[in-house]
Image: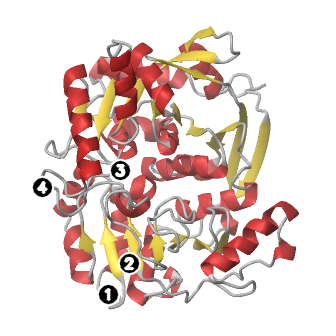
């Protein structure tokens, strides 16, 4: 087992006891809740006449079902209205801070936590959402939990968890100018497999990671779960501290320096022992897209789709299903694959730098007349900041719809969804069959820049070929 890693340090500092099941009970530093996975847990608390143990360590937002266009109450979708109302009641009764639609702070849980400074290094963070891994970008141990675990955390402030192995992923080389962190992480999942991280927590490091902004690190950590890992993290450093300084929940002055000293202390030791070490060369990455129905079925935009014989035996059945669903053939490239919808948003790529990058590609261009284009900021703060820079004008003038914050078409729970066999160029994280609301819909994952290029051309397009 690993020794001296950040994972070991954080785990040991939050260990309450080892349970008879063999699992460890960990104290939870931050519990993020939203409207979809929390109502049942609150109901179970009421059945047992229990209160929320640590409301001050719990933070709520509404993200999955909230409309991005018409938010008049009651919501048109009765089920969505019921979930939203339940969240409002539950948080009010328990004294939990709630970033609701009227606050200016609402957004996707994994955008709200970091931007408000709730997410800090060395914390244990849980949420009823698999992309909780995002918060590992700060050196937190963050992972998704199920409804019964949400109940447990609400009632006790702790969670039962099984300790995993730690794989160090050393990212070397240098990303080309046109390649992004999204391209990098898609390439990494392609290399290691969508189940390559099962049983592991990923520690990302190396010169490429050290040079990343916090937003880029969040994209990298966010996708850990798509590679099968329970969580992914990056050791905190000056980039982390500069991002945190001045945010709402972060202490100032001497208290900040004391906190920083603690954050430094939980970094992985120079002589830490890992269960596995993988080196990945970033210089091999070009703008990339998925060609299939998993985040691991990835090619460079100019690269042929692989034939079954080119794939490991265990991936061939999935490839056959992907060829049929996506209507592609080995040897073709994805360049020129027609799209009907483009979606820019999600907890993976719905932050301000993502909007800036897409706007830079869009400026001076128009969305293809046959394409429906949605830009959905990850939070109300992101939206306000983008509007202050005039990014909304660039999107609107190009032909995008500029929407309110939420998960939106990432998973299609709020009415923003694909219809029938529509094809979506998406900056989000999953391309499973049915993910964006239609069992016949087809999702192609890519970076924000590539989403913008697809919007302009009405097809998958190498962003390097656009006249910018």
Kindly tell me whether residue 125 is visible in this rendering: no
Residue that carries the numbered disc 1 in the rendered image: 365
Of labels 4 and 3, earlier in sequence is 3
Residue 72 drawn at (x, y percent):
12, 55
Of labels 2 and 4, earlier in sequence is 4
Residue that carries the numbered disc 2 in the rendered image: 361
Of labels 2 and 3, earlier in sequence is 3
Query: Closest to the observer: 281 or 113?
Result: 113
Please report contact status of discs 2 and 3: CB closer than 8 Å, yes or no.
no
Disc number for residue 161: none
Of labels 3 and 1, earlier in sequence is 3
Q: CA distance from mark 2 to mark 3?
A: 28 Å
Please report contact status of discs 2 and 4: CB closer than 8 Å, yes or no.
no
Residue 163 drawn at (x, y percent):
68, 25
Q: Residues within 10 Å of mark 4 (few under 14, many from 20)?
A: few
Please report contact status of discs 3 and 1: CB closer than 8 Å, yes or no.
no
Residue that carries the numbered disc 4 in the rendered image: 72
Q: Residue at x 49, y 27 (%)?
A: 148
Disc number for residue 64: 3
Query: Closest to the observer: 304 or 218?
Result: 304
Please report contact status of discs 1 and 2: CB closer than 8 Å, yes or no.
yes
Q: CA distance from mark 3 to mark 1?
A: 31 Å
Residue 80 drawn at (x, y percent):
28, 50
């Amino acid at each position: 087992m690993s020794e001296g890693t950040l994972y070991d340090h954080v785990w040991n500092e939050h260990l309450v006891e080892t349970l008879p099941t063999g699992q460890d009970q960990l104290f939870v530093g931050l519990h993020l809740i939203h409207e979809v996975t929390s109502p049942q847990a609150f109901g179970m608390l009421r059945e047992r006449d229990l209160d929320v143990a640590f409301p001050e360590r719990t933070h709520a937002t509404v993200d999955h079902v909230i409309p991005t266009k018409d938010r008049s109450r009651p919501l048109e979708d009765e089920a969505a209205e019921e979930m939203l109302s339940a969240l409002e009641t539950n948080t009010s009764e328990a004294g939990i801070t709630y970033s609701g639609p009227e606050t200016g702070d609402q957004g996707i849980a994994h955008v709200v936590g970091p931007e408000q400074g709730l997410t800090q290094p060395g914390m244990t963070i849980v949420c009823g959402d698999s992309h909780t891994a995002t918060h590992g970008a700060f050196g937190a141990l963050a992972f998704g939990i199920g409804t019964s675990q949400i109940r447990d955390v609400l009632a006790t402030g702790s969670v039962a968890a099984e300790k995993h192995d730690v794989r160090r992923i050393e990212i070397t080389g240098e990303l080309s100018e046109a390649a992004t962190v999204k391209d990098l992480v898609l390439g990494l999942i392609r290399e290691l497999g969508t189940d390559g991280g099962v049983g592991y927590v990923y520690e990302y490091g190396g010169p490429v990671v050290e040079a990343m902004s916090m937003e880029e690190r969040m994209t990298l950590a966010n996708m850990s779960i798509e590679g099968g890992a329970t969580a992914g993290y990056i050791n905190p450093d000056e980039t982390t501290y500069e991002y945190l300084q001045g945010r709402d929940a972060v202490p100032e002055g001497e208290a900040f320096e004391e906190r920083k000293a603690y954050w430094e202390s939980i970094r992985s030791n120079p002589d830490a022992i890992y269960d596995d070490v993988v080196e990945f060369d970033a210089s091999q990455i070009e703008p990339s897209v998925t060609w299939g129905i998993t985040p691991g079925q990835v090619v460079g935009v100019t690269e042929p789709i692989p034939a079954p014989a080119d794939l490991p035996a265990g991936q061939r059945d999935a490839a056959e299903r992907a060829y049929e669903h996506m209507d592609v053939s080995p040897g073709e490239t994805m360049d020129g694959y027609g799209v009907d919808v483009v979606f820019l948003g999600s907890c993976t790529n719905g932050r301000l730098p993502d909007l800036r990058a897409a706007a830079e590609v869009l400026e001076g261009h128009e969305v293809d007349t046959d394409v429906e284009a949605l830009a959905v900021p990850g939070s109300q703060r992101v939206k306000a900041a983008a509007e202050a820079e005039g990014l909304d004008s660039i999107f609107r003038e190009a032909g995008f719809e500029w929407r309110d914050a939420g998960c939106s078409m990432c998973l299609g729970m709020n009415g923003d969804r694909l219809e029938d066999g529509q094809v979506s160029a998406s900056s989000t994280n999953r391309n499973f069959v049915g993910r964006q609301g239609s069992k016949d819909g087809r999702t192609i994952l890519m970076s924000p820049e590539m989403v913008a290029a697809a919007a302009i051309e009405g097809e998958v397009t190498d962003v390097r070929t656009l006249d910018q």
